Structures are given as C-alpha cells and as structure tokens.
Image (tube, rainbow, N blue to C red):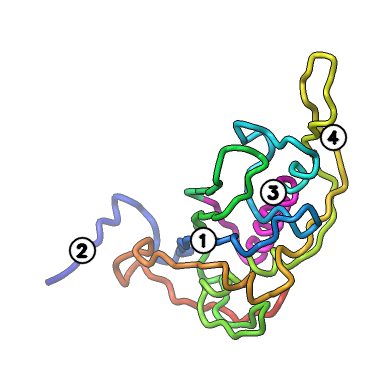
Amino acid sequence: MATVEPKALYGVSPAEPQQKYFTVAIAQGAFSDASSTAGGRVSPCIASDFATKPTTLAESLKVSRGNMRWKMMMEALAVRTNFRVVNIVTTYAADEGDSPITNLAFGLVFENGDYIPTTGTSIDGSSTATKADYIADKIGEALNTTKTENVLVFDPTQVSSVTVRESSTTAVTAAPVSSNTGTIRDAITVTEVSAFAPNTSGQLATDSALTYSAE
C-alpha cells in the first residue's frame, strides 16, 4: 500500500509551519463571584451582549472584570506565536448580566506549533510535559494576576433624559479569581486535537519545542 499526496491541490510545502489546534474548557464554579476585585470570573462577553444588561453597577463591574481577564488570557497566550480563537461557547444560568458564567469553552488554532513549549512549571508548582499543559499554565497565570485598566463600564445608574443607559470609562481592577492556585489550575482543561495535524509524514515538520519559564 502507498500514499500519494495530492500536492497540486493545496500547494503547501512540508517546510511550512504546522498549525496546531487545542480545545480549552474552564469550569468556573469554584471561582469568585463576589463584588470584590476577585469577582467576575472570566468571559469574552460585555454588558451589551446580554439580553438583560446588568442591573447594578456592582454587577456590571463583574462583567467588566471577566472581560478584562479574557483579554489578559489572550495576551498571555500570544507571547510565543500567533493564534486565532474559534468555537466560543459560554454557559450562563440565564441571558442576563447579573448571572455569573459557569463554564467557558473555546478552540485555539496556533500558527506555528513549534513555538509552543512542552516543559516548565505551573502556577501551582507542578511540572508540565506537553504543549497542552503549557497553554493551560499560561491561562492559569492570567487568571492569577492582578491588573488595573481603564475600561468602558456599563453604568445603569446613569440614565439620560430619554432613559437610555450609558457607559463610562472607569479604572477597574481584576484580581486573581481564587486565592488558591491549585483551584485555578484544576479548573482549566486543554486538549490537543491531533486529527487537525497533517496525516502524512511528508507534511509533518520536526517538533523543536523549547522549554519555558514564566515570561
């Protein structure tokens, strides 16, 4: 038996960087939903995404903190190579801004899999051995970080003469979603989708992933 590659169809040299696809799931039931800087969990959603917007400024700030952490997570993942996000699924009890997110799932397609390290140390002190572990660790680092940023916050207390609710630029601080690094790391599951890779040896590049430490 022999495999013949239809190179004329795709015209991609085996020397091209090989993309890699990972699925990510973050179970957030153990993350804080308090009105403190630890609250808000992590979500790509903003106030205007909900059918019913947050009803108090405190709830709106939670949404803003969650969105800040999403951006922090994306920045952490982009340190080594470009990527794109696909298939985002958010799980809430209801489509309202006062309802906390419970689960977040999405896919990551990395432009060059070689640039994703395989070994290092996680935020909880454990050792890692795969690219999926590295991605989970970078997500964990973002969720275990404190950052203050000026962001546009939906403010239900600001109502104009035509009863249109407004937003205002506010300095928002997002602290770690939990005081326990193990809780943060255990909530994150990253899985490589191996079938996304080329199927024949002629298309596969040699994996030259490096070790890493916290950037």
Q: Which residue carries the number 3 mark?
A: 67
Element type at mark 2 = loop
Circle 3 or circle 2, nearest the eye: 3
1 or 2: mark nearer the eye:
1
Circles 1 and 2, Cβ within 8 Å, touching? The answer is: no
Q: Tell me the CA gap for discs 4 and 3.
A: 16 Å
Q: Residue at x 47, y 61 (%)?
A: 23
Which label number is shown at residue 190?
A: none
Image quadrant holding the C terminus, namely bottom right
Res 164 → quadrant: top right
Instruction: Name the amino acid type tagged 4.
Output: Ser
Observer-nearest of 5 and 177: 177
Instruction: Give the distance between the C-alpha atoms of the residues marked 3 and 1, in whole angstroms.
Output: 16 Å
Amino acid of disc 2: Val
Residue at the disc numbered 4: 168
Mark 4 or mark 1, which has the lower sequence index? 1
How crowded pointer 1 is (Cα within 10 Å; few <14, some 14-19, many 20+) is rated as some
